[in-house]
Image (cartoon, coloured by chain):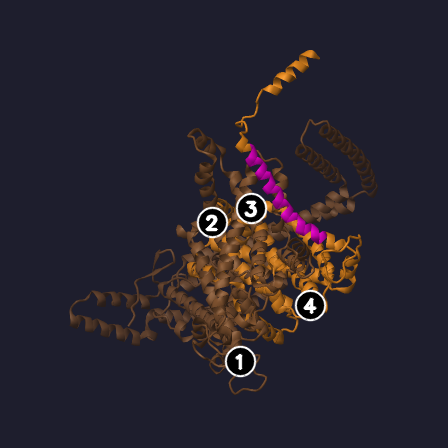
Chain colours: A orange, B brown
């Protein structure tokens, strides 16, 4: 026992860290750092916490008031479920976002492969054209979209505004992602293709069996971002969708805080909470992929 | 007068002698004429050439050729009858496939014999002879293959009938017990692996791998045992043989076609024609030229293009089948003097669509013309036009990029280009509340109004533009500085709980922005949480949303809150990747912390994320959501901003209000074009810096 305690005492006196010992200035700096960091944590968490509290506070009426007491209740969620189109909005948003992602993915996978691997006539010219087109902001055509939809729907009555919206989201996404995927496939050695070609693979086989599996990480990113874009967008959805049953979440939830007829702020907090949770989880889990997609050179304006 | 060459060429440049003596004589004369320097001699030779052409029909070779054609006609007529006659002699029990193969064999044997007589007369006969020879050589192989496999199949079926059901049942019983045992064993093994994991001997990854491996082994064992059951084994055998049969026949046919194609490349064609005519004559009807050149299936596809051109593109451009418009001419008239329900905007869009349709039509004309011309020129040289088998192969190889990116191009043209061009055109019109359904061209009037800051909508343009620029610079820079600073702090070695801080700090990025913006809007509304707190702190009634300065400040703070998370994320990624030895080296050289920051951290981080930061500026320039969802561009200040905009409106939300709320579409379009050009310029700057562009590796 004595031996052990003696050793312990000795250890306490030794400075074992490989960092230089803290000076007084260092300690002050560290304390300040912690203060700032914790202050920012509060700045981030407090508004989000307020949202959660308002969503569950049964005392809140139509408006969220600052000085109400708290009483746990889920009646705002019930309101959201019974009195609004919340579930329809969720369905619409998912339909639009997933369709956009799929459409973009399929088309981009082909264009990216074609532009990366083939030297065909008109390649450089069309690539330059796409580069120019992808810098045009999507809202530039805003006045024409609505009228274009009525023209098309006069020919094809089944062509709904939501489908138009999907195409509007997908068009620029195809243009800009073609570049990203092309760059990614460029970095894959063509030796694999050559080997496959010698083994008798057709172009489509190479696309399906070689390029697509290799490009999967980048395709995942493209799909994710083309999903997130429509999910978060307010402007275009607001322009094209006119009846509450066709709204997306962004447009629908805004009616709960902007329109006097449908005003219900706590219900908005509840809806926002429900919407945010899956998205936050998705962003946290797929953080790495999402960030690598950002740094891979998108120059969308 | 075009001349004839002495030799024919195939597409890899091999030369072949002419078989057509008449053309050969012409070619020789042509050569002599070109070599002759004496004028009179040349005249004489040309005269000779003319008389040769005049006596074309009487030329010995042509007479023979005529005779050959007659005989060929007769042969082709008789062979059909003979073939059906032969088919009748085949035994009834014969497989349909074998039957048709045998008939084909018979056909080609006869054909071979016939054309063999004329091999030296013309390349046509030569080619047909060799084509038939390939068939005669290879069809028996296919038939033999079918017979062997069918024999095996028959045997398998026989075995199937001979399977003893008792035996089968016994084996099945055995399998069941085996399965039970194996399952028990598997469970035991998995338990053992899990135990070892619990004891900490293996990692969790090793555990999952081991379990996977065990399960795979179990499945394999079961499969192996299963095939011991006669009925299952037999079933599988039959299935396999059937597939082998189908695939084998397909493969045989493919080889045959490839061999024929190969022969096609090796045997030239010989034509009297020496100038491409068809391409020019048929250029207006894509498909016809291909048909004349003998490429029937290819022609079919080009006829589809003809249908598109004459039944869709051109009628549409002329105004037929339009929703309201008049095709291209609608672009000029803009529905002027039209019916009441006719809208200029629709006329304009349909005009733009017409132009694109016409462009596509021109592209198709050109493609077809080029195709026919190329084929014809090659035919004159001596290269045989490719058949469908070869064309298909070319489409799948060289046409692949066109075919696969065509749908994407279609979407880009009609969904991106048509609206953008419409907006561009719209900016030269006077579409405003007074001229909603009918408007006219006004030239650059809108741009003039904006530039001079005149008119109802143009007067506030510069005010809004100034605020947009201030907003873009301040809000984005604030977010960047905040994010960068926080990332530096968290990345400090001595800070504990890095993971916690990082998770919290990216929350504003992960929570959908529209939700947080709307909630902030609720919190600063009268009676909201933040308002209440501010009121009690300052002991005054503060209404953020009714005050221009406070609204703007709040917007900038919110955007700082939102945008910093993204910058934090990017910076953290880069910081973690900076090698530690850089700092150690700096320390040894006596650098202070500030110097390390200034000379190592900041340059490295900036270098990597600068292009992304540029996009942050363009993003905020067009950040509609935060402005509109927070306070709808308000508060309104009619004295300075009129009734069309609020004092926190950006150009983009101003455009939205002009175009979609107040119906000043024309001037909104002009502003849109202005914004787009700016954004495109910055995007292009960013793009020019990217690696691929600089190295010219487009």
Which is more N-terminal, label 3 or label 2? 3
Task: Give the numbered dot on residue B394.
Answer: none
- Up the image or down, B411 lies above or below A228; here it is below
Is there any visible trace of residue B76 in the rendered image?
Answer: no
The answer for which chain carries disc 1 is B
Q: Point out the frontmost of discs 4 and 3.
A: 4
Which is more N-terminal, label 2 or label 1? 1
Q: Which residues are magenta?
A: A27-52
Q: Is residue B536 left or right of residue B414?
A: right
Task: Give the numbered dot on residue B344.
Answer: 1
Total label count?
A: 4
Q: Point out the frontmost of discs 2 and 4.
A: 4
Tell me where residue B536 appears, x and y as whole percent. 68, 54
Was residue A34 drawn as part of the magenta stretch in this picture? yes
Magenta highlight: main SS: helix
Find out whether the residues at labels 2 and 4 contact each other: C-beta distance under 8 Å.
no
Q: Point out the frontmost of discs 4 and 1.
A: 4
- Helix or strand or loop: what does disc 3 sit on? helix
Q: Nearer the viewer, residue A3 or B370?
A: A3
Q: Is residue A294 left or right of residue B497?
A: left
- Helix or strand or loop: what does disc 4 sit on? loop
The answer for which chain carries disc 2 is B
Tell me where residue A105 appears, x and y as whole percent. 58, 56
Pointer 4: what residue?
Answer: A259
Which residue sits at x=26%, y=67%?
B30
Pointer 3: what residue?
Answer: B568
| Placement of the N terminus of chain B among the 4 image quadrants | bottom left
Crowding at dot 4, Cα within 10 Å, few <14 / some 14-19 / many 20+, comes out as: few
Pointer 2: what residue?
Answer: B610
Is there any visible trace of residue B364 in the rendered image?
Answer: yes
- Label 1, label 2: how many angstroms apart (C-alpha)? 45 Å
């Amino acid at each position: 026992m004595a031996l052990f305690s003696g050793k312990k005492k000795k250890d306490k006196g030794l400075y074992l860290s490989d960092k230089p010992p803290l000076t007084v200035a260092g300690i002050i700096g560290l304390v300040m750092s912690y203060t700032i960091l914790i202050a920012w944590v509060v700045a981030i968490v407090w508004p989000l916490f307020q949202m959660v509290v308002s969503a569950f506070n049964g005392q809140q009426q139509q408006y969220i008031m600052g000085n109400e007491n708290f009483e746990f209740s889920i009646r705002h969620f019930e309101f959201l479920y019974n009195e609004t189109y919340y579930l329809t909005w969720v369905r619409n948003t998912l339909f639009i976002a997933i369709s956009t992602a799929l459409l973009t993915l399929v088309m981009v996978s082909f264009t990216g492969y074609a532009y990366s691997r083939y030297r065909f006539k008109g390649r450089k010219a069309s690539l330059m054209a796409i580069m120019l087109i992808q810098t045009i902001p999507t809202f530039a055509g805003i006045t024409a979209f609505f009228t274009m939809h009525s023209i098309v729907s006069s020919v094809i009555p089944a062509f709904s505004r939501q489908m138009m919206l999907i195409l509007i989201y997908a068009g620029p996404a195809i243009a800009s992602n073609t570049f990203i995927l092309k760059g990614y496939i460029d970095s894959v050695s063509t030796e694999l293709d050559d080997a496959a070609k010698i083994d008798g693979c057709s172009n489509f086989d190479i696309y399906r069996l070689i390029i697509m599996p290799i490009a999967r990480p980048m395709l995942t990113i493209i799909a994710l971002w083309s999903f997130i874009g429509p999910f978060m967008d307010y402007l275009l959805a607001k322009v094209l969708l006119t009846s509450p049953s066709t709204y997306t979440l962004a447009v629908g939830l805004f009616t709960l805080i902007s329109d006097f007829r449908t005003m219900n702020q706590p219900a908005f907090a509840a809806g926002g909470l429900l919407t945010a949770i899956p998205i936050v989880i998705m962003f946290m889990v797929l953080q790495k992929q999402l960030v690598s997609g950002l740094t891979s050179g998108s120059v969308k304006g | 007068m075009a001349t004839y060459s002495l030799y024919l060429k195939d597409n890899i440049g091999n030369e072949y002698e002419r078989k057509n003596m008449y053309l050969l004589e012409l070619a020789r004369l042509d050569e002599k004429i070109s070599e002759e320097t004496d004028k009179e001699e040349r005249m004489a030779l040309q005269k000779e050439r003319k008389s040769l052409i005049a006596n074309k029909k009487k030329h010995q070779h042509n007479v023979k050729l005529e005779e050959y054609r007659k005989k060929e006609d007769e042969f082709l007529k008789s062979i059909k009858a003979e073939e059906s006659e032969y088919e009748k002699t085949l035994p009834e029990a014969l497989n349909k496939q074998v039957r048709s193969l045998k008939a084909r064999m018979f056909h080609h044997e006869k054909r071979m014999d016939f054309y063999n007589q004329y091999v030296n007369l013309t390349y046509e006969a030569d080619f047909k002879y060799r084509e038939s020879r390939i068939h005669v050589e290879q069809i028996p192989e296919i038939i033999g293959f079918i017979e062997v496999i069918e024999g095996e199949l028959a045997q398998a079926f026989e075995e199937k009938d001979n399977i003893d059901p008792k035996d089968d049942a016994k084996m099945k019983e055995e399998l069941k017990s085996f399965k039970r045992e194996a399952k028990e064993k598997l469970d035991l093994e998995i338990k053992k692996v899990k135990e070892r994991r619990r004891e900490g001997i293996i990692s969790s990854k090793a555990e999952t791998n081991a379990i996977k491996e065990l399960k795979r082994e179990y499945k394999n064992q079961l499969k192996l045992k299963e095939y011991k059951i006669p009925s299952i084994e037999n079933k599988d055998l039959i299935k396999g043989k059937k597939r082998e049969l189908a695939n084998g026949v397909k493969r045989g046919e493919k080889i045959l076609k490839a061999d024929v194609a190969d022969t096609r490349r090796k045997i030239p064609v010989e034509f009297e024609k020496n100038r491409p005519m068809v391409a020019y004559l048929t250029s207006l009807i894509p498909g016809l030229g291909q048909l004349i050149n003998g490429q029937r299936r290819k022609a079919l596809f080009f006829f589809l293009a003809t249908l598109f051109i004459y039944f869709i593109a051109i009628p549409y451009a002329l105004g037929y089948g339009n929703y309201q418009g008049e095709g291209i001419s609608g672009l000029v008239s803009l529905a002027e003097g039209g019916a009441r329900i006719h809208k200029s905007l629709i006329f304009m869009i349909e005009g733009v669509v017409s132009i694109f349709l016409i462009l596509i039509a021109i592209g198709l004309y050109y493609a077809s013309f080029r195709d026919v011309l190329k084929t014809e020129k090659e035919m004159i040289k001596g290269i045989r036009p490719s058949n469908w088998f070869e064309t298909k192969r070319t489409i799948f190889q060289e046409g692949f990029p066109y075919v696969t990116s065509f749908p994407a191009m279609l979407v880009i043209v009609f969904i991106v280009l048509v609206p953008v061009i419409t907006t561009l055109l719209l900016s030269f019109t006077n579409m405003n509340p007074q001229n909603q359904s009918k408007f006219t061209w006004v030239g650059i009037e809108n741009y003039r109004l904006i530039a001079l800051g005149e008119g109802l909508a143009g007067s506030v343009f510069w005010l809004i533009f100034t605020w947009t620029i201030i907003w873009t610079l301040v809000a984005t820079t604030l977010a960047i500085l905040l994010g960068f600073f926080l990332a530096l702090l968290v990345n400090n070695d001595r800070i504990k709980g890095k993971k916690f801080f990082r998770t919290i700090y990216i929350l504003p990025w992960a929570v959908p922005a529209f939700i947080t913006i709307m909630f902030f809007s609720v919190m600063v509304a009268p009676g909201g949480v933040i308002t209440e707190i501010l009121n009690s702190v300052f002991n005054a009634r503060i209404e953020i949303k009714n005050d221009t300065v406070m609204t703007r400040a709040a917007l900038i703070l919110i955007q700082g809150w939102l945008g910093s998370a993204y910058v934090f994320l990017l910076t953290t990624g880069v910081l973690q990747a900076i090698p530690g030895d850089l700092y150690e080296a700096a320390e040894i050289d006596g650098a202070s912390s500030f110097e390390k920051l200034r000379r190592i951290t900041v340059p490295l981080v900036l270098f990597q994320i600068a292009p992304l930061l540029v996009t942050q500026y363009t993003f905020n320039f067009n950040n509609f959501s935060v402005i509109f969802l927070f306070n709808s561009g308000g508060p309104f200040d009619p004295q300075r901003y009129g009734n069309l905009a609020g004092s926190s409106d950006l150009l983009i939300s101003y455009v939205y209000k002009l175009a979609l709320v107040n119906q000043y579409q024309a001037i909104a379009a002009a502003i849109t074009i202005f914004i787009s050009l700016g954004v495109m310029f910055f995007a292009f700057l960013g793009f020019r810096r990217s690696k691929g562009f600089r190295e010219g590796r487009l």
